[in-house]
Image (cartoon, rainbow, N blue to C red):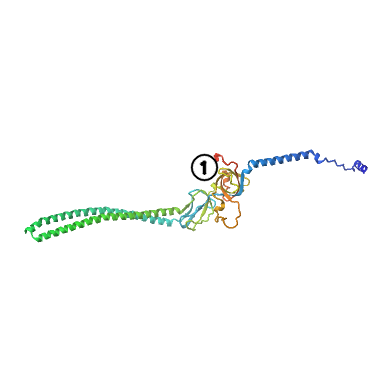
Amino acid sequence: MNDTAGVLRDTPAPPGKEAPAERPAPARNKTLTTGLGVLAVLVVVGLGAWLFNWWAMGRFVQTTNDAFLQADQVTVAPKVAGYVEQVLVSDNEDVVAGQVLVRIDPRDPAARLDQARAQFDQGEAAIAEARAQIDQQRAIIAQAEATLRGSKASATFAAQQVARYAPLVATGAETNERLDQLHQNRDQANAQTGGGAAQVLAAKRQIETLRAQIGVTQAQMEQAAALVRQASTDVEGSEVRASIAGRVGDRSVRPGQYVQPGTRMMTVVPVQAIYLIANFKETQIGRMRPGQPVQVKVDALGSERLKGVVDSFAPGTGAQFALIPPSNATGNYTKIVQRVPVRIRVLAPASLRAALLPGLSVEAAVDTKNLDPPPGRLAARAGR
C-alpha cells in the first residue's frame, strides 16, 4: 500500500496539467496570523477606548427624543366688534411689533366717541353756566344785604318814633291813633327786616346749591371722559396690530367678515425666539442643572448638530399640568416613570434659524458631568 502511494506520488502529471502546489498549514501562515492579531488588538483598543469614553463622558450624558421646538406664539384677536375692511398681511408673512394686521370698520366706535365728547362738552358748558349763576347770586346777595340794612334802619327809626311819642300820648299831647300808627310802622319795619334776612340766607344757600350742581356735573364729566377714553380705545382697536414680531400663521380672517371681540383671526409666531422643551425621565434629571451644555439634533436638519444650554425646569411633571391629573389614591397602583419638561435655549447660527419651526422633533443630549456649570454660562443666562 505504501509502495502504491509512492508510485502515485512519483507518477508524472498528465501532459498539459501541473501538479498542485502544497499549501502551508493555517497556523504556519504568518500573514493571516499577523492580521488576526492586529484585528484583535484594534478590537481591544476600540473597546477600551469606548469604555474609557463611556466612563469619563458617556455615562454623564442624558438623552431623550421626547423633545420639540416651541415658541411663545400670540393669538391675534380684535377688541371691538365690526366688519373687517382690510386684511393687510398674508400667510407666512414676517411682521414687526406694532404693524397693522387688520382694519375693522371704525364708524360705530367713532360715533360713540363723538357722542362721549359731546357729553363732556355739555358738562363743561353746564359748569360754566353754574359758575356764572354763582357770580350772579353773589350780586343778588349783596343787593339783599343792602336791602336788609335799609330794613334794619327803618325798624330802628320806627322803634325810636314809638319811644318818642309814647310819653306824649300819656300826657295827652298826641293821640292814641298816632301812637298806633307808629306801632304799625315799627312792626312793618321789623317784618321787612326779617324778610330781608331770609332773602340773604336764601341767596347764600342758592350758592351752595349751585356748587352741588357743579359737583354733580363734574361727576358726569368724569363719566363722559371715561366714555371718551373707552371710545378712543375702540377707535384705535379698529386697527388690529401685532403685539410682537414674528411670522403670521393660521390666518382665518377675511375681508367682509363680521368679528366679535376675542375672535381668533390669526397667530403670530416669534420664530426668532425658538426654544426647546425636552421631556426627560425623572431618573435622568438628578444631575441636571441650569447652564449645562446640550447637544441638539433637529430631525429636519439631518445630521446637523446644534448647541444649547439648559435654561430651567418645569415646576412639576407633565402629568401635573394635564387636563385631568392622575389620582393614585384609589384602585390598584402601577408605578410609571414620569417625565419632567426641561426648557433649553437653542444656540443656533443665523443661517439655520429660518429652518427652526415650532413643533419640529428634536433629540437632546445634556452633559451632566459638571454639576457646577462654568461661571460664564451662568452670567450669560443671568444677563439674558
Q: Nearer the viewer, residue 59 or 77?
A: 59
Residue drawn 14% across the image and 58% down it? 185
Query: Could you say whether the residue bearing mark 1 is in a helix, strand or loop?
Result: helix
Q: Which residue is mark 1?
A: 382
Residue 168, image quadrant: bottom left
Residue drawn 77% across the image and 39% down it? 33
In the image: residue 105, left or right of residue 36: left
Residue drawn 20% across the image and 57% down it? 194
Picture quarter with the N terminus: top right
Q: Position of residue 52 (x, y in %)?
A: 66, 40
Q: Position of residue 244 (x, y in %)?
A: 50, 49
Q: Nearer the viewer, residue 95 or 233?
A: 233
Q: Type of residue at label 1? A: Ala
Residue 156, image quadrant: bottom left
In the image: residue 136, left or right of residue 2: left
Q: Position of residue 80 (x, y in %)?
A: 45, 56
Q: Nearer the viewer, residue 231 or 85?
A: 231
Q: Position of residue 69 (x, y in %)?
A: 57, 49
In the image: residue 128, left or right of residue 183: right
